Image (tube, grey):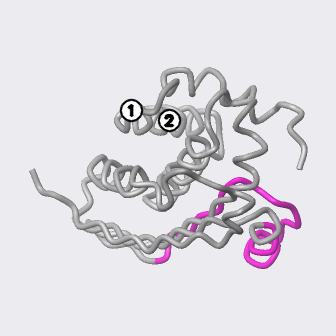
Amino acid sequence: MNIPQIDIDLVYHVDESVYSLPNMPDPRIRQAAGWVADQFSLKRLYVSIAIVDDETIQEVNAQRLGHNWPTDVISFELDESDDSVEGEVIASVQTAARVCAAAGWAVEDELLLYVIHGLLHVVGMDDADEAQRQAMRLAEQSCLLALGVAQAEQHEQRFDSVCNSEVEP
């Protein structure tokens, strides 16, 4: 088995006194990147990951995608070859803090889900239609299970109800 080379630049751009995450940086983020690289048979995955607040992600969303609202995660594939991918993931800890109770797990687990979702987009998965969405949920759940995240087995069933809930910014 080929062990993929994983290069991660992980930066937290948040006020730690407001968003205290117990494992900063969360070691599961590197493990998730390794899982994704392995599942997609990559020899190299380079990703820049920024953990930000809603104000910052809204600015990025407006500037880069033309959407003037906060969101959970934004990702971009920057470069891709046969067995190597470079990308960027920006995830909102503020959204994770707001949504985690409805999801039924800790803020760091919700944030990890956002990073996994972004990584899956970086390596080419999409969720534009129902079949793609289902495949994305299953991949997220498989990664969460591989990382030993409590309640990961319920992720697929509860995802749409959490996303469609009345959790307001």
Image-based side of 3 in relation to 70, left or right? left
Which residue lies at the image location 27% right of the left edge and 68% below the top edge? 44
The front one of 84 and 12 is 12
For the residues labelled 1 and 2, the Cα–Cα distance comes to: 20 Å
The residue that disc 1 covers is 148
Q: How far across and how far down the image is residue 54, in percent? A: 79, 62
Residue 132, compared with residue 47, is above or below; it is above
Q: Check if residue 61 falls in the magenta segment.
A: yes
Which residue lies at the image location 30% right of the left edge and 46% below the top edge? 39
Check contact, mark 1 vs mark 2: CB within 8 A: no
Q: How far across and how far down the image is residue 108, in percent? A: 58, 46
The front one of 26 and 5 is 26
Q: How far across and how far down the image is residue 161, in percent? A: 75, 26
Mark 2 lies on a secondary structure that is helix
Which residue lies at the image location 50% right of the left edge and 27% below the top edge? 152
**Dot 1, crowdedness within 10 Å: few (<14), some or many (≥20)?**
few
Residue 166, compared with residue 80, is above or below; it is above
Answer with the quarter of the image where residue 92 lies. Answer: bottom right
Q: Check if residue 29 falls in the magenta segment.
A: no
| Number of residue marks | 2
Where residue 6 is drawn, which disc sits there?
Answer: none
The residue that disc 2 covers is 135
Image-based side of 167 in relation to 46, left or right? right
The front one of 79 and 11 is 11
The amino acid marked with disc number 1 is Gly
The amino acid marked with disc number 2 is Ala
**Dot 2, crowdedness within 10 Å: few (<14), some or many (≥20)?**
some
Mark 1 or 2, nearer chain start: 2
Residue 105, compared with residue 97, is above or below; it is above
Q: Magenta span covers which residues?
A: 58-78
Answer with the quarter of the image where residue 81 lies. Answer: bottom left
Mark 1 lies on a secondary structure that is loop
